[in-house]
Amino acid sequence: MFEVVRAYIAEAKSFQPSSKEELEQFRLRFISKKGLLGDLFSKLKDVAAEERKEFGLLVNELKQAAEGKILEFKDAFETESSIDFKGQDLTLPGEPLNTGSFHPLTLVRKEIISIFSRIGFNVSDGPEIEDDWHNFSALNFPPEHPARDMQDTFFIDLTPDQTIYNGSLALRTHTSSIQVRVMDKQKPPIRTICPGRVYRNEAISARAHCFFHQVEGFYIDEKVSFADLKQTLLYFAQEMFNADTKIRLRPSYFPFTEPSAEMDISCQICKGSGCNVCKYSGWVEILGCGMIDPAVLENGKIDPSTYSGFAFGMGIERIAMMKYAVNDLRIFSDNDVRFLRNFKGVL
């Protein structure tokens, strides 16, 4: 039996496999559960006591020789490719990896946040389903205001056993509702922007949709003036588009600001020559703004005799249309891959 083990050792040490398959056969023959080593170890109890040590050393030597051969050739065979390159041109370029991209509205949202963060604005958030107080009443909307009508707002029907604080629920019509929530929790100075999705019951067209994305921003502190508002918005427009961008403020009306204005920028698509987006005027309205009404400050438990502030709200889609020269707002929600591919690598 000793000579048989020595023969196995010599065989293991001299083994030179030419393929991965041969190495696997060697492994199965010597060190698998039903291999030679298992059989030899089981016979150790039948060897005379005085010869058992010598026999055990020989079996261990065989084990080390077999395992050494397997380790020696395993890595070599794994690095060899089993692909047959015959008839293939290895100089051809490889197939590119398809990578994803950010949606253009996400890109614009991130850029708006970045621009305002550079002048001290932080970011606030709030729920998309709002009650009457935060969406309308606290923002100085009178009970008869048209925005409360079913023509403009998506109200949510409630079951008889549901009770909601101060009125019905609705999908928020603007992110100005977050302004009320922030004023409830913080005291001036407050400088924040509130990006998010909003909903309005409007006819879908190249310039309007029933859902869109908005950024509300406001600043409340002592001695805040309309001049501060104008300079902030001019800075934003020129940072978002280019240094040559012009703005104009037109008197308007919003229940929660007084005085109020709408801000136009020079059309970035036609450069002032006229197109369907600017209605051939050379100007595009991108946001509404104004000084926060004292009644709104009082609703937020802020003393209007000490503090003043400005607020503005803009549609992210409208900004994206100007920035990327898109002439139809609907394309942002069409999920057209051909359109989305244009924004790969844009950051």
Image (tube, helix red, strand yellow):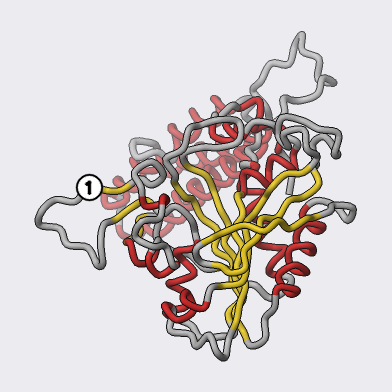
In the current view of this chain or complex, which residue is farthest to the bottom? Answer: 306
Image side of residue 81 versus residue 48, left or right:
right
**SS for tag 1?**
loop
Residue 72 seen in the current view: no
Task: Name the residue rendered at 80%, 51% in the picture.
Answer: 241
Give the residue type at disc 1: Asp
Mark 1: few/some/many CA within 10 Å (<14, 14-19, 20+): few
Q: Position of residue 339 (x, y in %)?
A: 66, 29
Quadrant of image for the N terminus: top left
In the current view of this chain or complex, which residue is farthest to the right? Answer: 244
Name above or below for residue 339 compared with residue 289.
Answer: above
Task: Name the residue rendered at 17%, 62% in the picture.
Answer: 163
Q: Position of residue 235 (x, y in %)?
A: 79, 64
In the current view of this chain or complex, which residue is farthest to the top? Answer: 87
Image side of residue 43 versus residue 250, left or right:
left
Circle 1 sits on which residue?
157
Name above or below for residue 32 compared with residue 125.
Answer: above
Closer to the camera in the image, 137 or 195: 137
- Indicate the quadrant where residue 168 lies: bottom left
Residue 321 seen in the current view: yes
Q: Position of residue 122 (x, y in %)?
A: 60, 72
Name above or below for residue 201 compared with residue 242.
Answer: above
